Amino acid sequence: MRAAITRAGALVVEEVPDPVPQAGQVLVRTLACGICGSDLHALGDPAAFADVVRRSGGTPCDIADGVVLGHEFAAEIVDYGPGTVRALPTGTVVCGPPIGFGPQGTGIIGYTPVFPGGFGEYMILSEAFTLPVPNGLDPRTAALTEPFSVATRAVRRAEPAPGAVSMVIGLGPVGLGIVAVLKARGHGPVVAVDFSPTRRALAAKLGADLLIDPALESPYDRWTSLGVITGTMDRMAAEYRGLKPPEAVVFECVGSPGMLARVVEGAPAASKIVLVGVCLRPDTVEPGLVANKELDIRGSFGGSPAEYRQTLRDIAEGRIDAGVIITGTTGLGSLAGAIAELGEPDRHAKIVVDPSLEDS
C-alpha cells in the first residue's frame, strides 16, 4: 500500500506491505484521517514523545522511524481476519477508538509499527472496537469523533457543577471540541481563549459565550465580571455566610512549557484545572500557591470506548457540529506541507487526510 511513513523523523511517502488482519481483526481502507496535534508533537520531538509514552506506561517504540501515523480515522471494511464475528458486511463505513490489540500485542493505532495508522491506504482494526458510521455521516466528519471524544473525556474529568464558569485556553481541535461538548451538555458560560481570530470564530460557531484574545487582555481579569470569587479568603468568607459562588474550571489545551504555571497563577481559588494539552517538557508550579488556593489539577488523556460511542452519537444526531472545524483536506503527497500549514493557526484548525486523493 501507499503510506506516509516516518523516516529519520520526517514523513516519506512509500510503498509498504499491506497490513494483514489477524485473529479478531478487520482490514479496512482509509477514507479520512485527521492530523492531530499529537502527531505534530511526535514528529517535532520524537525522543521526548517516546519518553513520555514510556514513562506513562505505554508501548515504547521509535516514533522517528518506521511508523505510519494517524489515529483519527474513518474507513471502509475490506476483509476480516480469522476468528471474527463479521457482523458488519464488507463495504460498511466504520470508525472507532484507536485501540489496537491482538496477537501482535496492544498499542495506540498510528503510534506503533504493528498497528499502522490512517496516513496509509489500509489499516487493521480490532473488530470489538469497530463501529458503523450512522446516518450517512461524511467520513471526514466521522473521523473527528476521536478528538471530540478526547474532549468528552476532559469534560467528564472536570465534572463541572451546574452554573460553573468554564474557560478553555487554546482552541485547537480538542479545545474547540471541549467548547462544543460543554455546550451540548448544557454548561455555561463558556469562555474561549486563543490568539487566532479564525479559531475564536470557530468557537463562536460551536456556542462559546465569550471570546477573548489574550494579546488584548488577560482572560484571568474576567473572572469577577462572571461572578467568580477569585481570592481564597473572599471565597472562604462567602462560604461562611452560606453563599455558593460559581465554580471555575480551566481547560489547559495549549500544552507548551510555562502554560501550567500561568494557569495556576491566574486560576481562582478552589477552581479545577484540567490538563488536556500535550506538553513534553517540564513546567514549574509553586506547590504553596496550589495548596493555598486549594486548586484541583487533573490530567485527561484520550477517550474510552464508551465516550467514543457517545460522541459519535452526538455528532451523528446533530448535537455537536464537529465538521465545522475542518479547514482543509490533503492527500498523502501533500501531507508534509499540510502539517507545516497547521503551524499557522490563522489558516487552519483541522486538516483531514484522504489517501485516495491524487496530489504531489
Image (cartoon, rainbow, N blue to C red):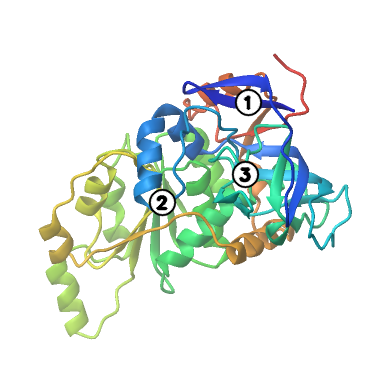
Q: Amino acid at mark 1?
A: Ala
Give how far across and how far down residue 198 sits, in percent. 52, 34
Q: Amino acid at mark 3?
A: Glu
Q: Secondary structure at mark 3?
A: strand
* Marks 1 and 3 close (CB-CB < 8 Å): no
Which numbered disc flags the more N-terminal residue, 2 or 3? Answer: 3
Crowd rating for badge 1 (residues with CA inside 10 Å; few <14, some 14–19, many 20+):
many
- State the separation of the CA atoms marked 1 and 3: 15 Å
Q: Secondary structure at mark 2?
A: loop
Q: Which residue appears at 72% of the width and 45% of the height?
A: 74
Which numbered disc flags the more N-terminal residue, 1 or 3? Answer: 1
Q: Which of the numbered marks, if any, corresponds to residue 276?
A: 2
- State the separation of the CA atoms marked 1 and 2: 27 Å
**Which residue matches tag 1?**
4
In the shown orientation, is residue 81 left or right of residue 192? right
Q: Is residue 194 visible?
A: yes
Give how far across and how far down residue 148 sits, in percent. 57, 52
Crowd rating for badge 2 (residues with CA inside 10 Å; few <14, some 14–19, many 20+):
many
Q: Which residue appears at 73% of the width and 29% of the height?
A: 355
Q: Is residue 138 visible?
A: no
- State the separation of the CA atoms marked 2 and 3: 17 Å
**Which residue matches tag 3?**
72
In the image, residue 163 sits, relative to residue 87, either above or below, namely below
* Marks 2 and 3 close (CB-CB < 8 Å): no
59 vs 227, nearest the viewer: 59
* Marks 1 and 2 close (CB-CB < 8 Å): no
